[in-house]
Amino acid sequence: MNISPMKKRIVLTGGPGGGKTTALDLIRREFAGKIASVPEAATMIFSGGIERSHDPKVLKAQQTAIFNLQKNLEDIQRAMNPECLILCDRGSLDGLAYWPGSEEEFLNTMNTTVEQELARYDAVIFFETAAKSGESIRSNNPVRNESEQAAVELDKKLQSVWSKHPNFNLVGSSESFIRKVMFGIMTIENVIGQYRD
């Protein structure tokens, strides 16, 4: 099997309460041994004792740490699993939606461009927040604290960033959860298929 010069990385992202983390768990089981997953960097940081803040200076420090941790976790999984598809619970550009300054400031701080970050990934699967359909976004994730209105705003910001990717796949909030998971599985199968002759 010849491997094409692809990144072999897929981002699962979207607004809070879209079902991506639960879907990721099911997808990981479906593709056991074929994929390696990268956990959500923000959850690792905030569940590790760092408190959320609304102070812009603190937010910038937190988002810088999350950005770097995300990329480092992806690199660790790539080193450990050179032939596997890497499935990421959020991606390096998610921090743009949480950054209290401009997009230009975020990119300068991280010493990157949108194009460089998008080029890290083969595909983006975007799970739209359930709040867009008027549903509750209550979660079992103890570090999640967004209101429905905040979830919709974050969803819009995230979608505007990630929709620039040439292989952007939107999973609408009105879809049933099973359909969301099946769509994610089909998208991953398509990316895996691109690596086969």
Image (tube, grey):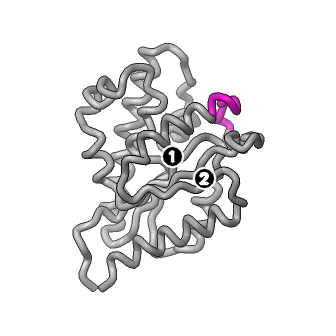
Identify residue type, mark 1. Answer: Glu
Considering the whole magenta stretch, tell me its main secondary structure. Answer: loop
Tell whether position 150 is magenta. yes
Against 46, residue 85 (above or below) is below
* Camera-side residue of 28 and 184: 184
* Camera-side residue of 179 and 24: 179
Tell me where residue 121 appears, x and y as whole percent: 35, 56
What element does badge 2 sit on?
Answer: helix
Please indicate, yes or no, whether residue 143 appears anywhere in the rendered image. no
* Residue position for label 1: 40
* Residue position for label 2: 21
Tell me where residue 52 appears, x and y as whole percent: 56, 24
Which residue appears at 33% of the width and 82% of the height? 196
Span highlighted in magenta in the image = 142-151
Against 192, residue 77 (above or below) is above
Graded by Cα atoms within 10 Å as few (under 14), some (14 to 19) or many (20 or more), the crowding at tag 2 reads many
Mark 1 and 2 residues: CB-CB less than 8 Å, in contact? Answer: yes
